[in-house]
Image (cartoon, rainbow, N blue to C red):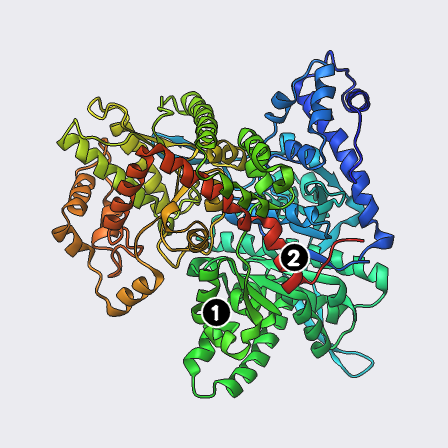
Amino acid sequence: MLQQYEPTQIARWLEEKLLENFGTDPQTATPKQIYKAVCYVLRDIMSELWLVNHNIADSHRNKQVYYLSMEFLPGPSLKNNAFNLHLEDAFRQALASIGQDFARITAMEPDAGLGNGGLGRLASCYLDAIAAKGMAGHGMSICYEYGIFRQKIEDGEQTELPDEWLNMGDVWLITKEDQTEEVHFGGKLEEIWDANGRLRLIHKDYTTVLAVPRDMLITGYDSDVVNTLRLWQAKSPITIDMKLFAEGKYLQSMEEKHMAEVISKILYPEDAHTEGKLLRMKQQYFFIAASMKSLVKRHMMKYGTLDNFSDKVAVHINDTHPTMAIPELMRIFMDEYGYEWDQAWDIVRQTVSYTNHTVMPEALEKWPESLFKETLPRLHSIVSEINRRQSVDLMKTYPDNEALRRDMAVINNGELRMANLCVEASHTVNGVSSLHSGIIRDQLFAGFSAIHPEKFTNVTNGIAYRRWLCQANPELSELIVSLIGPGFKKDAMELERLMAFTEDRGVFTRLEQIKRRNKERLADYIKEHNNIMVDPDSIFDVQVKRLHEYKRQLLNLLHIIHLYAEIKRDPGADIQPRTFIFAAKAAAGYYMAKQIIKLAYHLAQVINNDSQVNGRIKIVFLENYSVSLSELIMPAAEISEQISLAGKEASGTGNMKLMINGAVTLGTEDGANVEIHRAVGDENIFIFGLRVEDVERIRREGSYSPFRLCQTDGDVNEVVQFLSQGVNGQYFSNILNALTTGYNGCADPYFVLGDFGAYRDAQARAAAAYRDRDRWNRMSLINIAKAGIFSADRAVQEYADRIWHIEPLK
């Protein structure tokens, strides 16, 4: 049972924190000082809970999972932690007693710059759910000083600015200097024979970087288990070279310090050049080496042996970025604790599991072997031995299939393939939707699954639904409580009870009124930040996600051009008013993604200011998409655009967040859309377009011709012609070429034009459904009712039961 605190007690602690940290009192403190004092008080409460179940002397009574991810995206923590610990009202009253407003204080918090998109948000959802389930589970990553970047759109161009989130966000980080780890780069290997006649490799002449842990405490709803997100900050053991400084070489004297600390500056530095690849490689090894050392030390303090390591520790690799955990554990077991290869390998394989999040080739990481060997010589020797042993086994299994052996190899053609290493070494490999798991089993890793079919499974993604429903949409949450009680806050499957109200017009009216107020709130934000007036009575059609060609924001834009062309032909055309809302960051070096943002911007300039359109279409591109912005958008959305090319989106989680807020999915049979479709039925979703098997067949036959489509489909020809004439004085020849003639003989690789007709028709069906208010509100309610299966609680329970084998703390 969670302990509760009186508002007067919290107010007294706030006054103490203000005096202790800032030498001030509530009457003279700045809003920033008040904010930090509130966070410090809440952090102290969380720290007490953390000590109960994670003190070192009692560590690992239960098996614990360590979730390794290059990114986490926790979003603002103050409101979330207060909600999880049932302390919102106490803090609200305490702040009111000193003349402060809780809502205003929570609104000051920046998003933690620790992630980019769905991968990082999913990782944070799972940490939340692990704690809510009362299990021991910790995240490990890098303490990025500037995050990925703060996005600014200027005249249609994306500009990347530093995201200085630590100015306010560092209040949640507890620095533990005494647990600093050393990480070694470069150097050389020396062979020696030990006293037992065994050959040992000694790593010498390396460069050392210090990894300083900065821990963020993670709460779960209605749970007294508090876990840790450990973030490593890079520092140099040498702050300044005094000899160089004395010689007047001031910049050189600080070079080693800066070269070390750059490791934890930016998430995903551009890797189109060798320097970028090297920095990414160093980032990955940096946090993996520090993480593996720390958890092995913690285990040894409790047990004094590693023989039972896999009984007490589960290491989970979230996508391929943390793959170096495999050879690093081998290195620690063999070099630091004297284990032989076979024994170390058995422990590693029983400890490590792997989630694949994408089939996109560019995301299945590969490292140049020469660069890897130069940077991480000891790890290279271990991966080489894994590859040698794998080659021997594959020759026995597939003696007559050299192409398959090459495809499965850990090292081939001068590259280290991290996805293959993950599959080779992990005891379990899972995809993140039923469709995606089938693709990785039957296509991406078919050779592996033929040998070890038991290794492959599925865990469909889930979301921390209490953040997206109870916190982001409190009015809807209160309506649900009034209808079915509060049980859904602990068990999302309770939402199914809303199906009893699918013919209740009174519920429809209340649902519509809540949606209208959420749309008004978003409209106010759009007016303030974009200076665009949008109509809350129009359809809010939302596509918010990372900008990538396979997610097909371009298809959405082409359809908007089609609607605009209809109005220009017939200014009186009866078109259901729509507000198209986009938000997305494009990777800094992704030219085509940036061109799509630019097209959206200039298309908006044309359409939003055309008097003939008369407000029937508005385009809004919201810059710097984040968790906090998402919390504003999701409750207001009515159409959820999930229009990736079938077979490309592993799962998606934005589709789930929109669904639980009552938006209706308009999408392809891709990722978790398949399972949403199955849950809500044909009548409560708008499915269109090519299926996975269609895409595979067309590619196999080589029968796709976007040029022919331009000749035979009048609407396709019209939108292409519109683009060819320029938009707002800007020309988009690269987009046109990609769609029609293509590069290297590959035109329209994501079938944007191929799916255009089906998408146009699906949009028309959605507009017709929206006119029937009872029908639309029923669809919205059914989507909410059926969203419970997409809870992170359910996903984490599946991981716990079938993959990690962890249980709640006693």
In screen coordinates, is 220 left or right of 599? right
Q: CA distance from mark 1 to mark 2?
A: 27 Å
| Residue at image mark 1 | 441
CA neighbours of label 2 inside 10 A, class few (<14), some (14 to 19), many (20+): many
Does dot 1 land on a helix, a strand or a loop?
A: helix
Vertical placement of residue 292 versus 410, above or below:
above
Q: Earlier in the sequence, mark 1 or mark 2?
A: 2
In depth, the one of 277 and 32 nearer the eye is: 32
The image quarter in which residue 375 lies = bottom right
Question: Do labels 1 and 2 touch, CB within 8 Å?
Answer: no
In screen coordinates, is 639 left or right of 470? left
In the rendered image, the residue lying farthest to the right is 57
- Identify the image quadrant of the N terminus: top right
The image's mark for residue 44 is none
Vertical placement of residue 791 versus 309, above or below:
above
Does dot 2 land on a helix, a strand or a loop?
A: helix
CA neighbours of label 1 inside 10 A, class few (<14), some (14 to 19), many (20+): many
Q: Given the image, on which type of amino acid does mark 2 rest?
A: Ile
Q: What's the residue at 39%, 59% (across, down)?
A: 647
- Residue 648 is situated, as x and y percent measured from the top left of the image, at 40, 57
Q: What's the residue at 54%, 51% (across, down)?
A: 789
Q: What's the residue at 68%, 43% (across, down)?
A: 220
- Residue 674 is situated, as x and y percent measured from the top left of the image, at 42, 55
- Residue 495 is situated, as x and y percent measured from the top left of the image, at 55, 43
Q: Is residue 685 visible?
A: no
| Residue at image mark 2 | 288
In depth, the one of 223 and 441 nearer the eye is: 223
